[in-house]
Amino acid sequence: MEVHEEFHELSSEIFCKTALGNNFESGKRIFKLQQQQEILTNQAMQNVYIPGFRFLPTKMNKLRWRLEKETRDSVRKIIEVNMKTSENSMNFLSILTSGGSMNKVGLPLDIEEVIDECKTFFFAGKEASANSLTWAVLLLAQHQEWQHKAREEIHRVCRGNEHPAVENLQELKIVSMIIKETLRLYTPDNSISRRTSKNVKVGSLNIPAGTEFYIPQAAIHHDTKIWGLDANEFNPARFVEPPKHLGAYFPYGLGRRICIARNLATVEAKITLAMIIKKFSFVVSPSYIHAPMMLTTVQPQYGARILVRRITN
């Protein structure tokens, strides 16, 4: 199976059901538009920046503008449908449009600001979860001992139940360690950027307002001074205890700007992995080529082919 594609389909459906009131077909179209936009964005970032060039009606810029307009129009239609449907009153879109969500000046979000928020949630809600699940399955396929440990734990915790339940999800300690180690090795984002809103002092540094910082997650998560000489190896046991330094591990960011959907992503990954590991064993296909590709997120360049066998006993 090509699990990378399968997990993108799965995370798309989960996001649409939990956030969009089950507008799956409409959501799929937006996901495809954003995938095209991601490729164009990375191409632009690899070119020399020329001030004002993005306003010129070049072939690529026209394509970017068309994708942006179509994405916003599609999100706007979903919002309009959702606002007319009372049964979706508790989903993510309803919360954003209810007037309870405020912008940076303390006013309720207008429709364009809601669309901006939705674009971010669309991309992050699908990409991060799908990629994390892909890498987790690949790592477990390569390290059979951890796959066996996780399977034993799942059978013990679920006690014959078909699926893990809310009541026992916290008991899946080994599965949690596997997910944490996966996010350390293959962090959803390559780096986190922050901009100071006012003059601040950090240690002995005086930092003026408007300064941009780039925190390289991948570099910190693979630093041998922090994680030891096996920093590049898959070892979930390192998470038996929390990291000694708070800033050593931050796959979803830190502080006030930490990812708002981190709990959803963690629960999604834990349930999905538990259900797969319980019913299937898997190894890496001989045709798999290991080539992590750093776009906006870290993805397998040539996909992730896995040999899957159903567990009958």
Image (cartoon, helix red, strand yellow):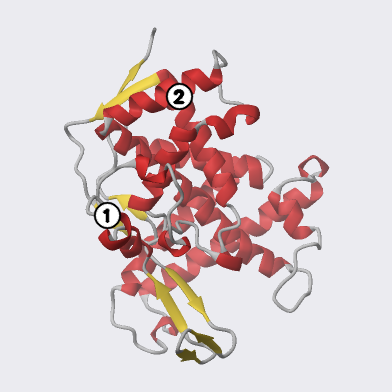
In this picture, residue 7 sits left or right of residue 89: left
Q: Residue at the spot x=32%, y=33% of the render?
A: 140
Quadrant housing the C terminus: top left
Q: Nearer the viewer, residue 291 or 208?
A: 208
| Mark 1–mark 2 distance (CA, rounded to whole Å) | 27 Å
Q: Which of marks 1 and 2 is in front?
A: 1
Mark 2 sits on what residue? 153
Is the residue 106 above or below the residue 79 in the image? below
- Element on which disc 1 rests: loop
Quadrant housing the N terminus: top left
- Pointer 1 or 2: first along the chain: 2
Mark 1 sits on what residue? 228
Q: Can residue 293 be seen in this view?
A: yes
* Amino acid under disc 1: Gly
Q: How crowded is mark 2: few (under 14 residues within 10 Å), some or many (20 or more)?
A: some
Check if mark 1's residue and mark 2's residue have beta carbons within 8 Å. no
Instruction: Please state the horizontal and vertical placement of residue 256, each as a whole percent of the image.
Output: 61, 67
Q: Residue at the spot x=72%, y=46% of the render?
A: 91
In this picture, residue 116 sits left or right of residue 272: right
* Amino acid under disc 2: Glu
